[in-house]
């Protein structure tokens, strides 16, 4: 069927049920899956203790999920075309829900890792298919509002995940972070079965038959699997100082380059890499990748700063982040409405500018004396730009893309966001560790034993400690220890400042790229502007 006929077919077809009812149902499934990518983070020590494993071994609970999730995401469009989108979506829901039950019942770490792999595979199809269903269910002029609802799930879930996971684990058991998926998953499965349907063009694509690309699948599994493990374990294993990490880097590079070359010449590729010939599509994927970096970098940086340097509990740090989540909850629908009146590229430019300013402002406000209120307001400032990015970038990805590619678009753009989150988490973790060492060396020059300022500070501290009842030798030892702790804390704080500056520069570069995007007609969704 020609592209024009498919477009007409999609414009004529409308779902039997209210589009907003369908939107809520699929967004609920996506929210459940995105929540699971972050909710288990704070429960790892409890899992390790309960299952007789080390903390190092327990981190594979996260890695195993992310690896299988990342493999399914880019081929979800191909799987939807092969199986039918509704059937694929329901299958993913069923696998995710059943494996959540098995994760909660797992008697050993080995079985938990196996069930997490299954859970990640089931969850990998939920995000992109929810987005693709929204793209087909709503007319172009309403896509911005529909994507705003989806954006709330994609951005809010990682924000509340650690706080919710900490509360459930502390008050009940780590197993309940998996059990809570059961009622949501079962209810959503029946709602999807009742209300969601495939557009006619998907049925015709399915009946055409698809050839199974064994080589492409193998290259994808090994390439993405190696890359995800590399990103997740790199800092812990000292990156290229580890033969294991070096081997993963070689495998990932060879397999992913081979995958692109192989898929480029395939008639029925599992990943349609030819779509990246479009500058608009390639740019929107790059921006979604950067958005993933920004979102998860700030989600890692702020609670880590508050907990490690200021002594906040996980729940108190979560409260400091929650205000930002509420801002996004109100902001996203407004931005969705703005897409009907303002060009997407202008909204994107505004978002990147706000984010660049916010990250630069963070370099001026981050210090060891910041109050809870100031940290809360800082988080609000950081998320304002995010609200202006998710919906317009998603809309831009569809500009000039034929309707039968909607599944592939959704799979790739969600894959890029997820990989951005992995890269962002690895990047900021490494930057904090390396820059802390750098600043500690610099600050160490000011606390040398022969320095008059150091001697005065140490003598004053020792005197106060001696007055509190310590002996003179013990007072001196405690004084040196306190000064060393202070140097470490200040070095870490400066490392956070450096990291926020890197994020500010990255956002500024994206701001200029936004103006190179093609114009779209506001209110026409993925339609390109004339002229």
Image: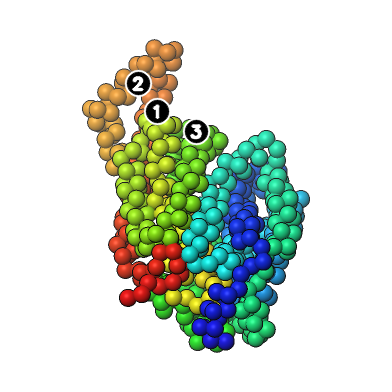
Query: Nearer the observer, disc 3 or disc 1?
Result: 3
As helix, strand or loop, the secondary structure at mark 1 comes to: helix
- Going from N to C along the chain, the mark reached first, 2 or 3, is 3
| Residue at the spot of label 1 | 482
| Residue at the spot of label 2 | 461
Q: What separation in Å lies between label 2 and label 3 (alpha carbons)?
A: 26 Å
Q: Are marks 2 and 1 in contact (CB under 8 Å)?
A: yes
Query: Nearer the observer, disc 2 or disc 3?
Result: 3
- Number of residues whose C-alpha sits closer than 10 Å to that of mark 2, classed few (under 14), some (14–19) or many (20 or more): some
Residue 517 visible in the current orientation: yes
Residue 223 visible in the current orientation: no
Q: What separation in Å lies between label 2 and label 1 (alpha carbons)?
A: 9 Å
Colouring style: rainbow
Q: Is residue 152 left or right of residue 464?
A: right
Residue, x 36% and y 51% (percent of image)?
355
Choose between 460 and 108: the one closer to the eye. 108
Query: Looking at the picture, how far across and down is residue 237, in whole percent?
Result: 50, 56
- Going from N to C along the chain, the mark reached first, 2 or 1, is 2
Query: Looking at the picture, how far across and down is residue 491, in whole percent?
Result: 35, 40
As helix, strand or loop, the secondary structure at mark 2 comes to: helix
Residue, x 53% and y 59% (percent of image)?
146
Residue, x 52% and y 36% (percent of image)?
319
Q: How many marks?
A: 3
To which quarter of the image does residue 408 belong?
bottom right
| Residue at the spot of label 3 | 312
Q: Is residue 482 left or right of residue 21?
A: left
């Amino acid at each position: 069927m020609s592209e024009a006929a498919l477009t007409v077919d999609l414009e004529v077809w409308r779902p039997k049920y209210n589009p907003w009812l369908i939107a809520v149902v699929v967004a609920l499934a996506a929210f459940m899956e995105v929540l699971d990518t972050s909710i288990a983070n704070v429960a790892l020590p409890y899992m390790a203790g309960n299952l007789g494993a080390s903390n190092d071994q327990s981190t594979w609970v996260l890695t195993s999920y992310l690896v299988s999730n990342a493999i399914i995401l880019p081929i979800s469009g191909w799987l939807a075309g092969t199986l039918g989108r509704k059937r694929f979506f329901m299958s993913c829901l069923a696998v995710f829900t059943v494996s959540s039950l098995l994760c909660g019942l797992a008697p050993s770490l080995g079985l938990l890792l196996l069930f997490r792999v299954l859970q990640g595979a089931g969850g990998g199809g939920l995000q992109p298919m929810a987005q693709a269903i929204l793209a087909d269910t709503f007319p172009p002029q309403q896509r911005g509002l529909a994507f705003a609802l989806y954006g709330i799930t994609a951005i809010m879930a990682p924000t509340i995940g650690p706080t919710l996971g900490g509360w459930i684990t502390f008050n009940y058991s780590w197993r309940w972070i998996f059990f809570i998926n059961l009622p949501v998953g079962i209810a959503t499965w029946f709602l999807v079965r009742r209300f969601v349907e495939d557009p006619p063009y998907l049925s015709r694509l399915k009946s055409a038959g698809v050839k199974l690309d064994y080589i492409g699948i193998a290259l994808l599994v090994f390439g993405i699997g190696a890359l995800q493990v590399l990103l997740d374990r790199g800092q812990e294993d000292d990156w290229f100082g580890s033969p294991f990490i070096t081997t993963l880097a070689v495998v990932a590079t060879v397999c992913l380059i081979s995958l692109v070359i192989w898929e480029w010449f395939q008639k029925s590729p599992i990943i349609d890499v030819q779509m990246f010939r479009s500058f608009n599509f390639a740019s929107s994927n790059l921006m979604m990748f950067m958005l993933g970096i920004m979102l998860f970098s700030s989600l890692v940086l702020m609670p880590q700063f508050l907990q490690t340097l200021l002594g906040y509990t996980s729940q108190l740090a979560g409260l400091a982040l929650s205000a930002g989540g509420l801002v996004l909850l109100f902001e996203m629908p407004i931005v969705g409405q703005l897409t009907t009146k303002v060009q997407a590229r202008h909204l994107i430019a505004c978002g990147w500018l706000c984010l660049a300013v916010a990250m630069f402002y963070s370099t001026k406000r981050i210090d060891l004396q910041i109050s809870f209120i100031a940290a809360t307001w800082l988080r609000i400032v950081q998320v304002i730009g995010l609200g202006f990015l998710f919906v317009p970038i998603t809309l831009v990805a569809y500009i000039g893309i034929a309707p039968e590619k909607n599944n592939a678009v959704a799979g790739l753009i969600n894959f890029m966001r997820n990989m951005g989150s992995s890269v962002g988490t690895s990047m900021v973790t490494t930057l904090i560790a390396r820059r802390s060492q750098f600043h500690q060396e610099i600050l160490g020059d000011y606390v040398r034993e022969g320095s008059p300022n150091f001697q005065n500070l140490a003598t004053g501290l020792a005197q106060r400690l001696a007055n509190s009842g310590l002996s003179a030798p013990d007072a001196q030892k405690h004084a040196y220890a306190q000064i060393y702790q202070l140097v470490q804390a200040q070095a870490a704080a400066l490392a956070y400042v450096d990291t926020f500056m890197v994020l500010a520069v990255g956002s500024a570069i994206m701001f200029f790229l936004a103006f190179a995007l093609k114009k779209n007609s506001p209110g026409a969704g993925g339609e390109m502007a004339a002229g």
